[in-house]
Amino acid sequence: MRRHALLLPLAFCLPALLSAQEPKGGNKPMLGVSLEIVAKKDVYVFDGGGKSPAEYKQHLETIAAHLKKGEFVDPPKPLSVDLVLRLTNTTQEPITIYVGGDPNIYTFTLSGGAGVVTMNNPVAFTTDFRLPKAVTLAPGKSYEQPVRMLADGHRGFARLLFWTGPGEYTLTAEYTLADAEGRKTATVKSAPVKITVKEK
């Protein structure tokens, strides 16, 4: 009985040990990949189109409510930003990740300031399925995904985010990686960065 009692914990630990020792050249994203938001520009000027922050926020919320109901209205032009999503190999060995394509989705969380409004983007996407591409990173090396508009989701354009007035905002990101066949696997998260929106 004592022998069985000793083997039982080992049986439960074995899958975890095997998982940790899986070869690093497979199709799964590897542990040891970090995500960072690089704000090449972190100060922006508020433009409410002649509306006060309160009026602008109410205007955005009205549009978002219509879109949520499936009613078609033209959303505002996406906010222009100058950001980079940086995926870095934090291990001591080369690893291969799969980036781009439809399965790899990044999602932003914006908070603070005068408030934030998000809305669906009623844009038509092509029906083709875009597979990710393989990128091999040496130890300490990175892959960078430029972000030119404050949008995320499918193909980086399915959801729009808006700050609604001057203030200090906090931005974080999540990036869902996929394998070579486009199957979603791991999600990595960034530390927050600060964005300042000033009066026009």
Image: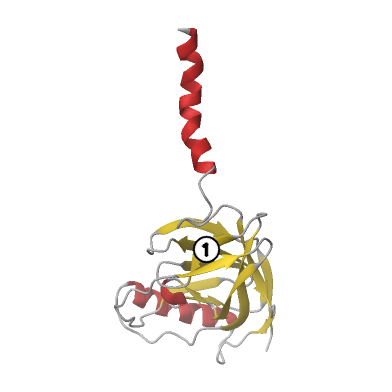
Residue found at the very far top of the displayed protein: 1
Classify residue 68 as left or right of residue 2: left
Which type of secondary structure does the marked residue at label 1 adopt? strand
Q: Nearer the viewer, residue 82 or 129?
A: 129
Q: Nearer the viewer, residue 69 or 189?
A: 189
Q: Which residue is mark 1?
A: 97
Instruction: Give percent across and percent down for residue 77.
Output: 48, 87
Q: State which quarter of the image contains the N terminus.
A: top left
Instruction: Give the residue at x 60% y 82%.
Output: 81
Query: In the figure, residue 61 lies in which quadrant?
Result: bottom left
Q: Please indicate, yes or no, whether residue 38 appears anywhere in the rendered image.
A: yes
Q: State which quarter of the image contains the C terminus.
A: bottom right
Q: Please indicate, yes or no, whether residue 109 appears anywhere in the rendered image.
A: no
Amino acid type of disc 1?
Ile
Instruction: Give percent across and percent down for residue 108.
Output: 54, 68
Q: Is residue 77 above or below residue 69?
A: below
